[in-house]
C-alpha cells in the first residue's frame, strides 16, 4: 500500500494533526513513549495509508535508553518501507524548533529534527515539514526563514512551499500541509503513469 508517514519529536502535535487529517480519534496514550508500534489509518480524501510513528526525543519519565530505542525503531521502519512511502512528514513545533535545534547543534551532535529531515531526503522520500503550533508564533517569517536555514534550505521560506508547511493543527488550519502533501502524491502518481 502507498503510504504517508508522520515522524517527529513527542509533543509537537502529531496526534492532533493525525486526527485532523484522518478524522479518526487517535489514542494518545496516557504515558509518554507508550505508543511503540506504527499506527495505520486510511486518509479518507486520498486512498493512501497514513502511518503515525512514535515520537522521539526528550520525554519526561522515559529513560534515555528507551528513547534511543524508539528512534531506532522509527528509522528501521522507514528504511524497511521506503519503497512504498510516498511522502515523509516531519512534524515540528514552530515555536520551539529553532531553539531546540540550536541548543543541540555541536561538533559531534546533530539535532533529531535535522537528522530525520536529512535521513528522509537521503532515502529520496519526498519530505514535508509540518511546522505546527504557528498560532503561538509572532515572528512568522523570521522563524520559518531560520528553520529553512537550519535545515540547509536557502531562505526565504516561501521558496519552499512544497517542503515547509506552516500549520496550526489544533485550530484546524492545515491547508499548507494538505497542499504540500497533495503536490507530492500527484507527482508520485504522475511518475507511475509515464
Ligand atoms: P504528539 O505527542 O506529537 O502526538 O502531540 P499531541 O498531538 O498530543 O499534542 C501535544 C500538545 O500540543 C497538546 O496539548 C495539544 O493540544 C497541543 N497542540 C497540538 N497542536 C497544536 C497547535 O496547532 N497549536 C497549539 N497552540 N497547540 C497545539
Image (tube, grey):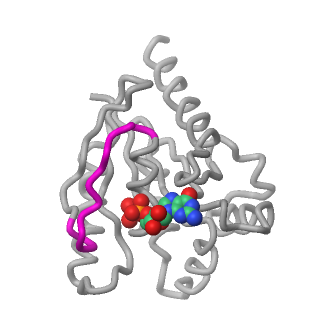
- Which residue sits at x=30%, y=68%? 71
Q: Nearer the viewer, residue 76 or 14?
A: 14
Horizontally, is 155 left or right of 181 in the view? right
Residue occupying the point 35% across, 70% down: 56
Tell whether position 27 is magenta.
yes
**For this rendering, which residue is in front, 71 or 106?**
71
> In the image, what residue occupies the spot 34% across and 80% down?
59
Visible residue check, residue 8:
no
Instruction: Specify whether 160 is left or right of 174.
Output: right
The x, y position of residue 152, in whole percent, is: 65, 62
For image coordinates 51% across by 17% down, the residue present is 190
Whether 6 is drawn above or below 44: the answer is below
Classify 96 as above or below 2. below
The magenta span reads 21-34
User: Does 101 appear above or below 184?
Assistant: below
Q: Position of residue 157 (x, y in %)?
A: 75, 54
Q: Label the magenta part by its dominant secondary structure.
A: loop
**Residue 153 seen anywhere in this rendered image of the structure:** yes
Q: Quadrant of residue 43?
A: top left
As for residue 150 lying within the magenta part, the answer is: no
Q: Is residue 4 above or below residue 145?
A: above
Residue 81, percent across and down? 27, 43
Q: Position of residue 177 (x, y in %)?
A: 58, 42
Point out the image quarter for the N terminus. top left
Q: Which quadrant holds residue 7? A: bottom left
Q: Residue furthest top?
A: 193
Q: Nearer the viewer, residue 30 or 193?
A: 30
Q: How many marks?
A: 0
Q: Tell me where residue 3 sits by quadrant.
A: top left
Amino acid at each position: 500500500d502507498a503510504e504517508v508517514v508522520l515522524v517527529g519529536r513527542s509533543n509537537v502535535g502529531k496526534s492532533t494533526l493525525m486526527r485532523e487529517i484522518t478524522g479518526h480519534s487517535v489514542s494518545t496514550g496516557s504515558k509518554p513513549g507508550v505508543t511503540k508500534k506504527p499506527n495505520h489509518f486510511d486518509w479518507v480524501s486520498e486512498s493512501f495509508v497514513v502511518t503515525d510513528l512514535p515520537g522521539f526525543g526528550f520525554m519526561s519519565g522515559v529513560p534515555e535508553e528507551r528513547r534511543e530505542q524508539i528512534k531506532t525503531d522509527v528509522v528501521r521502519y522507514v528504511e524497511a518501507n521506503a519503497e512504498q512511502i510516498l511522502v515523509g512528514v516531519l512534524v515540528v513545533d514552530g515555536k520551539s524548533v529553532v531553539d531546540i535545534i540550536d541548543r543541540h547543534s555541536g561538533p559531534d551532535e546533530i539535532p533529531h529534527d535535522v537528522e530525520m529531515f536529512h535521513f528522509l531526503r537521503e532515502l529520496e522520500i519526498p519530505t514535508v515539514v509540518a511546522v505546527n503550533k504557528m498560532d503561538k508564533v509572532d515572528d512568522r517569517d523570521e522563524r520559518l526563514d531560520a528553520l529553512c536555514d537550519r535545515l540547509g534550505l536557502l531562505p526565504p521560506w516561501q521558496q519552499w512551499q512544497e517542503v515547509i508547511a506552516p500549520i496550526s493543527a489544533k485550530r484546524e488550519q492545515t491547508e499548507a500541509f494538505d497542499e504540500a502533501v497533495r503536490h507530492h502524491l500527484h507527482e508520485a502518481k504522475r511518475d507511475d503513469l509515464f
